[in-house]
Amino acid sequence: MFIQTEPTPNPDTLKFLPGQEVTGATGPYDFASVDEAGTSPLAQALFDVQGIVRVFLGSDFVSLSKDPDADWKHVRPMALAAIMDHFVAGLPVMATDAGAIPAAPEGASVDDYEGDAAEIA
């Protein structure tokens, strides 16, 4: 996978083009903090990159803003790796009902589990 980057008028923001659809027709999505990124596994992964302060997901691009004190020479490679890892793993950009972990059936209990047990040391 080859990801291109483009500068923006803001020196603290870079545009990443993964060469494939990011949000498609469902976006764009703008996350100003990690707390807002709960619906996007991609945004969550990008906020794990030290120095990232804002994530914008467009139809075919990802725009990242860094802390003014951070240097792109350190942030950019980590951001590229996070984007590449996400898409190569085939993870969803946005969590949806179809991609979410299903809820337990109504009235279900942890005592209803009938699988194998394992001891965790």
Image: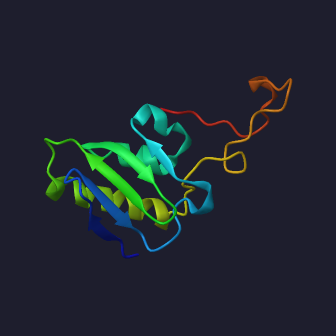
What residue is at 72 percent from the left and 50 percent from the top?
Answer: 98
What residue is at 46 percent from the left and 59 percent from the top?
Answer: 86
What number of labels is visible?
0
Give residue 97's quadrant in the image. top right
The residue lying toward the viewer, choosing from 6 and 87, is 6
107 sits left or right of 60 in the view: right
The residue lying toward the viewer, choosing from 47 and 119, is 47
**Where residue 67 appears, x then y in whole percent?**
21, 41
Quadrant location of the N terminus in the rendered image: bottom left
Name the colouring of the figure.
Answer: rainbow
When the figure is inspected, residue 47 is found, relative to residue 93, above or below; the finding is: above
When the figure is inspected, residue 76 is found, relative to residue 21, above or below; the finding is: above
When the figure is inspected, residue 1 is found, relative to residue 53, above or below; the finding is: below
**Where residue 84 appears, x then y in whole percent?**
40, 65
**Where residue 46 appears, x then y in whole percent?**
37, 49
The residue lying toward the viewer, choosing from 45 and 69, is 69
- Residue placed furthest toward the right: 107
What residue is at 52 percent from the left and 53 percent from the top?
Answer: 28
When the figure is inspected, residue 47 is found, relative to residue 104, above or below; the finding is: below
- Residue placed furthest toward the front: 9
102 sits left or right of 33 in the view: right
**Where residue 26 appears, x then y in whole percent?**
62, 55
